[in-house]
Image: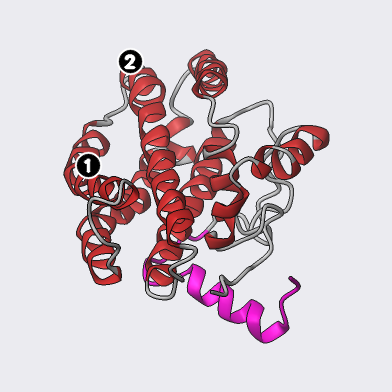
Amino acid sequence: MALTTSDSAHSSELADTPWAPITLINYPFQGIVPEDPVALVSEEMVIIHNALIRSLNAIWHNSAIVSQKDTPAFVNYSLVVLAAIHSHHDTEEDVMFPAFVAAGLDMEGNKEQHRAFHAGMEVFENYLEQVKRNELPYDAATIRELLKDFAGPLVQHLHDEIPTIAPEILGRLDKAVLDNFVKDLDAHIKRAGGLTTTIPCVLGGHKAQDAPDWPPIPPFVRWIARNIFSRVNASYWKFAPFTQTGEPQVYRP
């Protein structure tokens, strides 16, 4: 459903609260992969982090208004958002941190911040799983309380991590290190899967106005991701802050 100007402004405001997204260094980000990845890595990370932040905001806002009929789909959407966060941080732990630490960069602060919010995420995830199995009733106040317990430290980490991989930091590394990192990252992402969960989730958290050509993949692959992969769990994505093409949307019970 097309949004009015008023609806669109309302949707954008909801997408950016209560946790603020990160300001892009270059706006809008063109999402074009340069030969030198130094300038790309931090901006790509901002785009992904913002998709996760805005997805958390969507959970916060929609938790209080979701209809009884839509509650199972909303619970599944929330679980997919958490899975996307896990996948993102697993990628950092398995690929990014080892590569940069081996090259002499200090990633210990980022690792410590990961540990700081994982316990709270697990509590939230366990609650959602119990609701999904009908072992506990759905309660919006509980959703918000558990979400708030870990989302604050998580979002702070998502903001704090960007300066640790800024171009002036990564510019100190040998180009071969960065080239190998990008190659290993691409291979890891392909192995991770999530074609019908993580990918539609991240696309639904992405604001097209910030980066119209993101993700930087061939147009036909982008079309398949938006129009085919998203169909499998189509009932989930109405809770996302944006459509699969990055346009603002508002969940209407």
Q: Secondary structure at mark 2?
A: helix
| Figure quadrant of residue 34 | top right
> What number of labels is visible?
2
**Amino acid type, callout 1:** His
Residue drawn at point x = 78 percent, y = 40 percent: 223
Image coordinates for residue 25, horizontal then vertical, percent:
55, 55
Tell me where residue 208 appears, x and y as whole percent.
68, 57
Residue depth check, mark 1 versus mark 2: number of the one nearer the observer: 1
Comparing 72 with 183, the one in front is: 72
Calculate the distance from the C-alpha at mark 1 to the C-alpha at mark 2. Answer: 25 Å
Viewer-proximal residue, 34 or 47? 47
Apparent side of residue 142 relative to residue 43 in the rendered image (left or right): left
Q: Residue type at mark 2?
A: Ala
Which numbered disc covers residue 102?
A: 2
- Label number found at residue 144: none
Using a 10 Å C-alpha cutoff, classify the residue at mark 1 as few (fewer than 14 neighbours), some (14 to 19) or many (20 or more): some
Rendered position, 184 above or below 81: above
**Which image quarter holds the C terminus?**
bottom right
User: Is residue 201 toward the left or the right of residue 78 in the image?
Assistant: right
What residue is pinned by disc 1? Answer: 118
| Residue span colored magenta | 1-23
Name the quadrant containing residue 59: bottom left
Magenta residue check for 223: no
Q: Position of residue 193 (x, y in %)?
A: 54, 25
In this rendering, the answer to whether 20 lies above or below 213 is below
Splitting the image into 4 quarters, where does residue 168 fall?
A: top left
Residue at image position (61%, 80%) is 9
Could you tell me residue 184's position as x and y percent? 51, 16
Residue at the spot x=55%, y=22% of the render? 182
Q: Camera-side residue: 80 or 172?
A: 80
Residue under the point 59% across and 61% down: 238
Name the N-terminal-most of marks 1 and 2. 2
